[in-house]
Amino acid sequence: MTSPDGLSLRRGPCPVGAVRFLRAASPGTADRFLITALDLDGRVVGRLDYRLCHGCRAGYVDAIAITGPWQGYGLGREAVTLMLGHAVAYRWSTSRRSLPGRRFFAAMAEETGVVFEGRAVRCTHLR
């Protein structure tokens, strides 16, 4: 996969081996979720925080982060794919504050066909 400016977004296999992903609702909420990427020793190497409004069929990515040495191996891509699988046919948005974030979500939109709007979707429940 390449970004819109032609840069490669994948490095190849993860350097240490398998990474597992856990998805859980954030404590005390029904609409906030966290996907955590863990290495073989159980250390957190990435996370994706997002919110869903099932009534409006809308989702918002609050934050996605992969630790430096693990960037470029497709972990963010895998986390977003898992997220989308739990909210099929939802409208998605993200803040897109950083240039790498804008590039990442543009590449994900191209790969998945899901548009990640640059501002919050019109859902009062996600504010």
Image (cartoon, rainbow, N blue to C red):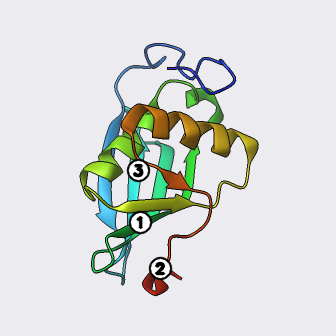
Above or below for 38 versus 123 = above
- Tell me residue 19's x, y (percent): 36, 32
Q: Which residue is mark 2?
A: 126
108 sits to left or right of 53: right
Mark sitting earlier along the chain (2/3)? 3
Q: Position of residue 40 (x, y in %)?
A: 36, 31
State whether residue 18 is above or below residue 60. above
Q: Examine the rendering and report whether any part of residue 48 can be seen.
A: yes
Q: Residue 17: percent from the left, percent from the top?
A: 38, 20
The picture quadrant where one finds residue 18 is top left
* Front-most of residues 91 and 19: 91
What secondary structure is found at the residue carrying circle 2? helix
Q: Which residue is mark 3?
A: 36
Q: In the rendered image, which residue does mark 1 sit on?
A: 59
At 74% from the left and 49% from the top, the residue drawn is 98
Residue 41 coordinates in the image, percent (x, y): 39, 35
Q: Residues within 10 Å of mark 2 (few under 14, many from 20)?
A: some
> Observer-nearest residue: 4 or 99?
4
Q: Amino acid at mark 3?
A: Thr
Question: In front of the other: label 1 or label 3?
Answer: 1
- Residue 76 appears in view: no
Q: Disc 2 to disc 3, how far (Cα)?
A: 21 Å
Q: Quadrant of residue 9?
A: top right
Counting residues from the start of the chain, the first of labels 1 and 3 encountered is 3
Q: Residue at x 39, y 40 (%)?
A: 113
Tell me, yes or no, whether the two marked residues, 1 and 2, touch with CB atoms within 8 Å: yes
Q: Quadrant of the C terminus?
A: bottom right
Cα distance, mark 1 to mark 2? 8 Å
Q: Regarding mark 3 in the picture, which secondary structure is present there?
A: strand
